[in-house]
Amino acid sequence: MKKWPPLRLLPPLLLTFFSLFSFSTCRDTITINSSLSAQETLVSSGGVFTLGFFPANKYKYLGIWYTKISKQTIVWVANRDSPINDTSSVLTISSNRSNLLLQSSSNNVLWSTSISANLVNPVAQLLDSGNFVLMENNTDKIVWQSFDHPTDTALPGMKVGFISGQYRNLVSWSGSDDPSSSNYKFSLRLSGFPEFFLLDGLKPVGRNGPWVGDHFSTEPAVVNNGTFTSEYVSNDNETYYTYYVNNPSIMSRVVVNQSTIKRYVADTSGSNWTLYWTFPSDQCDNYGQCGSNALCNTYTSTVPDCTCLTGFQPESEKDWKLRDTSAGCIRQVELNCTSDGFITINNAKLPDTTNATVDTTIGLEECRNRCLMNCSCTGYANSDTLNGGSGCVTWVGDLVDLRQFTRGAQDFYYRVAGSQVPVTSTKKNRNTGIIVTCVVLGLLFLASTVYLIHKKLRKNHENVAYMQRQRQISFESERPLALVRDKAREEGLSTDGNDIVLRVFHASVISAATNNFALANKLGEGGFGTVFKGELEGGQQIAVKRLSKFSTQGLGEFKNEVILIAKLQHVNLVRLLGCSIEGEERMLVYEYMENKSLDTIIFYKARSSQLNWHKRFEIIKGIARGVLYLHEDSRFRIIHRDLKTSNVLLDDNMNPKISDFGIARIFGGDEKKSHTNRVVGTYGYMSPEYAMDGVFSVKSDVFSFGVLVLEIISGKKNRGIFSVEPSLNLLSYVSVLFNIHLFFSTIKANFITNYLEYNSKIILQAWTLWKEGKALELLDSSISSNSNNNLQVMRCIQVGLLCVQDRQEDRPHMSEVVLMLNSLNTSLTEPKQPVYFSVRDASNMESSSSCTVSDMTVTVIEPR
């Protein structure tokens, strides 16, 4: 008789039996009612990727890895720089339904999606592409995705480059068991002809070269066997690279591993990875291996062969003999811009294109002619190699990181003196008769033009002498100063009485520094013209304000700004380095501000989180100190008249600096206020007495500062909707209003109504919340409110409302503002109703209309 197992063994046996035949119920989503603990995972619907917690470097991290690969391969890490040191962390959707939160057991937020979204039924889902997304359930509305925040790995479909105003870089792990960010990253440089660099901090390790149609310049030998499809997009809004795998049975990843970039492939069955491609692949891929103006190749061995380009010689023969080629090569014969020629390098990797200029509308021959006409041009090539080549790239300065391949690359043409161009066999075999004829004709032509050449050279000599005499310019008079003898003045470093001694740049120097005012170097644009980023020969970065010939800011404003800024020295004012006046060209050269203007950060949710409350408070105080200096502490007492977020620049440490003094006014020590018939400024920042009556004073700047404070706190523009109802018709007014004075008063009353509606959006919101006791609700949603900040926030809101009061007599002076911001013990008065709520009575309006505003220049701010 068969014996059955004891009853005590039945439960574990049954459990084992059913586990063998049960089906997996792994989930791939997190909802508002569920979370992911440290012991759980999410698995994508097709089982390709897993999201969960993994151990590394004695800590735990939240990441994504391939499910079927035997050796765990992490492709994304959420909290790479905020490791978990407990076992009870959890990933949830926040209570306000707008963010994913990774919290420790003590409820500390270790990582967050940090976005502003209004979702009704949010769900976070892991997709088979490896993308982890936060979206509205049952819709395609994705509000956040991990593909927008890569770590060290690029998966198929992931975009790397510059997208939506942000750089998406690949950043290597610090070690094989340490996912924290290292100094090594794969990053796009937008300047010149955009290309990707492998960087160690700021030092280039290697570069991919620019995209030349269907591949990067450094990858000519990469065979397109149909396995992958590459996509490169570059326009005014974004520049990025992505790739796709055409074979569904193949998995691929591109990873930055310290000083290398590698592409791996694997079979979807779960086999181990195979190395498909690596960069740098040899020593010639190392950035600048042979120095400047030299050619690197590995034709004969694995040891790089460095040779100077034809027409060049080693800068240090001794170092080259010791195989130290870092100093590169220098020209044997200098260019003269009249008889120069070009030498071709076949199958070349294009030189560093950071300072190159691109024009995709012309062909190679026109590109050659353009390079010849530009005496600074040192080389050219096609920007696209498809279909026989098209487009134009030109270089200035030294040619760096140039190499030659055995096949597959493109032709590059570099400039040398005419005597250095090799003579072709065709020239050697010319018919003797043709040569004699040409010589005779040449002599006749030379004899007929020698006088003109002599005259031209003499004129050029006179022009050079004239430019040397113009190196120092007095902006208080139309005449040049006498030649200076003091070395400090010669370098433009001092002032003398009322004359401004300032460094005067030659236009060609500024043109070279800005790559001939390339579109990629454009920083901004306004009524005055355009601002460009540049770099001088010594490496100093500059911002060049180029005055337009049709600018609303003319020579008077130009001289005004030079006079004012050159004599102003304060940590919160932008520093003027020099200027340029040549023909109708007028330019100002400033120090370059790394973080551009304040409005490019606080009004854009993608960047506003860079400014926490502490930094915003420091910016407010810095602006206040700068305005106080202008009003009371500078050599001149100055009213800026155009304080706004776009005129506050931020350096690399986010310190504010006030700029743009084109419409500023100097006023005397006893002068209380002034009138003007020409109102200039910006809607949303003009004080009511200035906009309506043309009356300005230091209190006009105080009003603008108050608006700035409220905008910095809220992250919103002080703008409403400008509507004119009913619309004014000149004939209808004339027919109805026989009294001409009443006619102009009515027009002005209509302007005032619209001004109040348009000028007071954030002021209205701040005042309403203040009266309701809800002022903290004004704080930008990207800033986390806490008890340590609340007192400062409330104080700044009150200061802002005091500054935007209707009557200028009620507004504080800037000295009082600085004291109120820096001393929390200083008592503050209650603000009165701001201009939006105030009704100016008929008598006031009638009297104010006697000051006719006959010329008004108003700037309306639009997002960049």
Image: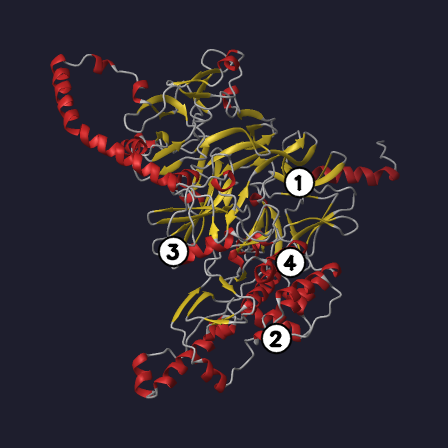
Distance from label 3 to label 1 (Cα)? Answer: 59 Å
Distance from label 4 to label 1 (Cα)? Answer: 41 Å
Looking at the image, residue 736 lies above or below residue 104? below
The residue that label 4 is drawn on is 621
Looking at the image, residue 239 lies above or below residue 265? below
The residue that label 1 is drawn on is 63
The residue that label 2 is drawn on is 810
Within 10 Å of disc 2 (Cα), the crowding (few <14, some 14-19, many 20+) is: some
Name the image quarter holding residue 526.
bottom left
Residue 183, x across and y down, in percent:
62, 34
Disc on the earlier residue, 2 or 4: 4
Name the image quarter holding residue 234.
top left
Q: Amino acid at mark 1?
A: Gly
Q: Amino acid at mark 2?
A: Asp
Residue occupying the point 87% across, 39% down: 7
Residue 625, x across and y down, in percent:
62, 58
The foreground one among 319 and 425 is 319
Name the image quarter holding residue 806.
bottom right
Distance from label 2 to label 4 (Cα)? Answer: 21 Å
Give the total number of marks visible in the rendering. Answer: 4
Looking at the image, residue 2 lies above or below residue 817? above
Identify the element where label 1 is drawn.
strand
Disc on the earlier residue, 1 or 2: 1
